[in-house]
Amino acid sequence: MANSLYEFGMIGLGVMGRNLLLNMADHGFAVIGFDKDTEKAQALESSASAGTRVKGVVSLEEMISQLQKPRRVMMLVPAGKPVDDVLASLHPLLEPGDIVIDGGNSHFTDTLRRVSSMKDAGFHFMGVGVSGGEQGARTGPSIMPGGDKEAYAHVKPMLEAISAKVNGEPCVAYLGKGAAGHYVKMVHNGIEYAIMQLISESYRLLKAAGLNNDQLHQVYKEWNEGEMQSFLLEITADIFLQNDDKSGQRLVDVISDKAGSKGTGKWTSQEAMDLGVPATVIDTAVAMRTISAFKDERVEAAKVYEEPKIPVSAETKLFISQVKDALQFATIMCYAQGMAMLYNASTAHQMDIPLPEAVKVWRGGCIIRSALLGTFYAALKQAPEVPNLLLNKAVADIVKSKEHNTRAVVVQAAQAGLPAAGFMAALSYFDAYRTEKLPTNLVQAQRDYFGAHTYQRIDMPGSFHTSWQHHS
């Protein structure tokens, strides 16, 4: 009987759910999937490789009854109420010891609540972040599991088998207690927002320097072949050569500049503020997507405020080199801010996130994979308790070598009236972080003056308040 049962079940057979199951089947696991949509259930079976055990059903009860115990079930459904609805449907069908995995983009606070409620009911619950898109799900994603460590032991062989591999190492690791998996995925998405914003700014700067789409393709292709190699640069190079089948133009030139979002970048920004960790480049990326939505207002504003006519002054080849350095500099700031969030959240939310493992998981399969992560992984293996990557010597050496050109790019963008908020935020964060004495002593004085909020002194411990005098 046991041999006829399935080893893993999936609820939700959209592209991601279907591809993850097919990936598992290709690695020798017997899998079963449920979806209310008959066509999706059928598509699962018809897409399976020859010789694999794959079944699609439209009855949740049927799926649960055909799973080996302890049952291992993953949900890939929209975040929020749909997850709670599925859990409510599962409760009467499960037995104590069964394992339920939320593989969607749930907010970590929802995952914390579900971990607790499922444990009270006798079930194991895990929040697992999955990155890599539909292709990654099929051929090898980055997987970020957290939560019940006992449950992880039951799914570890499957997750390691289907994950991306870097130097033979699987891009999956247990990332901590509670909602650690979804927290790490949230930060991953915030970094993704930020890097995409920076690349878009670099594109705008290079267009201002006169580069056409073929030249832009070549620039990003060359950048992707060196120390800056990354998935996002790779796809950026491809984008510039894509023709539009409707207009005959390059597709990038007919795509609207109103960017969409699903909210995960905003979650990262909000959580950073709640945590008290500056994530200025991520904040800026979220804000710029918001500004992009105000298209009608921007059109009107462009009529009121003419764009400056100051051209980019640097010689083209030099400017390309400067933008390249600025992009790498600012990208490091994105990662540094995200990793600082994980460092602080690990303690604040009692998740015990192993920082080297988080970086290791990101090296392959995920959207933010890049050559830089190898440097970060080595840095964190050497000193896992460093609160900020910028304090690591190897990282600092890269930053210092790119600083001069970053300043040159920010100056030229400002003079030419080109929006480069991400680059500016990255440079300002760096300047503030490396400054021993900030002007916030004046802010402390102001707060005490108008609100008696007290201040600290540099020459003695304690909190102080002054009856400030008005001078006319």
Image: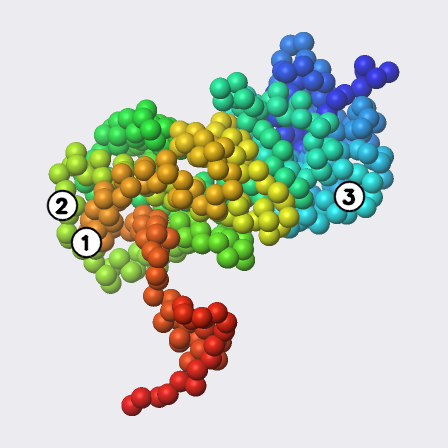
Amino acid at dot 1: Gln
| Residue 403 visible from this viewpoint | yes
Q: Is residue 47 above or below residue 444?
A: above
* Mark 3 burial class by Cα count in 10 Å: few <14, some 14-19, many 20+: some
User: Which element carries disc 1, helix, strand or loop?
Assistant: helix
Among numbered discs 3 and 2, the one appearing first in the sequence: 3
* Mark 1 burial class by Cα count in 10 Å: few <14, some 14-19, many 20+: some
Left or right of 467 in this view: 65: right
The residue wearing badge 3 is: 118
Q: Is residue 245 above or below residue 276?
A: above
Q: Quadrant location of residue 89? A: top right
Q: Residue at x 64, y 48 (%)?
A: 350
User: Which element carries disc 2, helix, strand or loop?
Assistant: loop
| Residue 133 visible from this viewpoint | no
Coordinates of residue 209 in the picture (x, y in percent): 19, 40
**What whole-number distance in Å separates the C-alpha atoms at marks 3 and 1?**
57 Å
The residue wearing badge 2 is: 313
Left or right of 212 in this view: 53: right
For the residues bearing labels 3 and 1, Cβ distance under 8 angstroms: no
